[in-house]
Image (cartoon, rainbow, N blue to C red):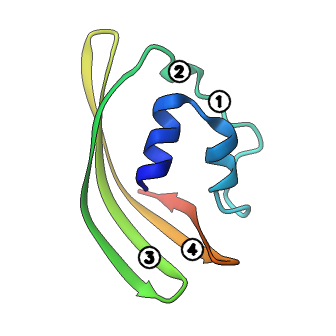
């Protein structure tokens, strides 16, 4: 989760795509709506290991865009594939 947050702050779409589960990965990841965002921090609220290959992470990411503060609060699902944790989806 922390590495994906860092990738968002750097707009590193290659890393985000590489760590996104192929079944839910967007065909074209567009971060242009976040251009100019100033990322302020990531707080991991909790994580839960469901089984050896599935886990959830609840987090809050804070950022500022156009002088307005925003919070992204999500519970993300991850699946381990070939030893690597991949982002599946979140709500």
- Indicate the position of residue 17 as horizontal and vertical percent values: 68, 48
How packed mark 2 is, by other alpha carbons closer than 10 Å (few <14, some 14-19, many 20 or more), is few
> Which residue: 74% across, 37% down?
28
Q: Give the mark nearer the N terminus: 3 vs 2.
A: 2
| 60 lies above or below 82 | above
Q: Is residue 89 left or right of residue 19?
A: left
Q: Are marks 1 and 2 in contact (CB under 8 Å)?
A: yes
Q: Give the mark nearer the N terminus: 4 vs 1.
A: 1
Residue 31's quadrant in the figure?
A: top right
Residue 19's quadrant in the figure?
A: bottom right
Q: Are marks 3 and 2 in contact (CB under 8 Å)?
A: no
Q: Are marks 2 and 4 in contact (CB under 8 Å)?
A: no
Q: Nearer the viewer, residue 25 or 36?
A: 36
For disc 1, the marked residue is 30
For disc 3, the marked residue is 55
SS of the residue at dot 2? helix
- Indicate the position of residue 40 as horizontal and vertical percent values: 27, 30
For disc 2, the marked residue is 33
Q: Is residue 90 left or right of residue 83?
A: left
> Which residue: 43% across, 56% down?
1
For disc 4, the marked residue is 79
Mark 3 and mark 4: span between their CA atoms?
Answer: 7 Å
């Amino acid at each position: 989760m922390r590495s994906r947050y860092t990738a968002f702050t750097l707009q590193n779409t290659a890393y985000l795509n590489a760590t996104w589960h192929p079944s839910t990965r967007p065909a074209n990841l567009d971060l242009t709506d976040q251009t100019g965002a100033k990322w302020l921090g990531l707080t991991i609220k909790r994580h839960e290991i469901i089984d050896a290959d599935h886990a959830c992470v609840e987090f809050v990411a804070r950022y500022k865009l156009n002088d307005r503060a925003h919070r992204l609060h999500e519970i993300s699902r991850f699946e381990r594939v070939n030893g690597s944790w991949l982002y599946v989806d979140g709500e």
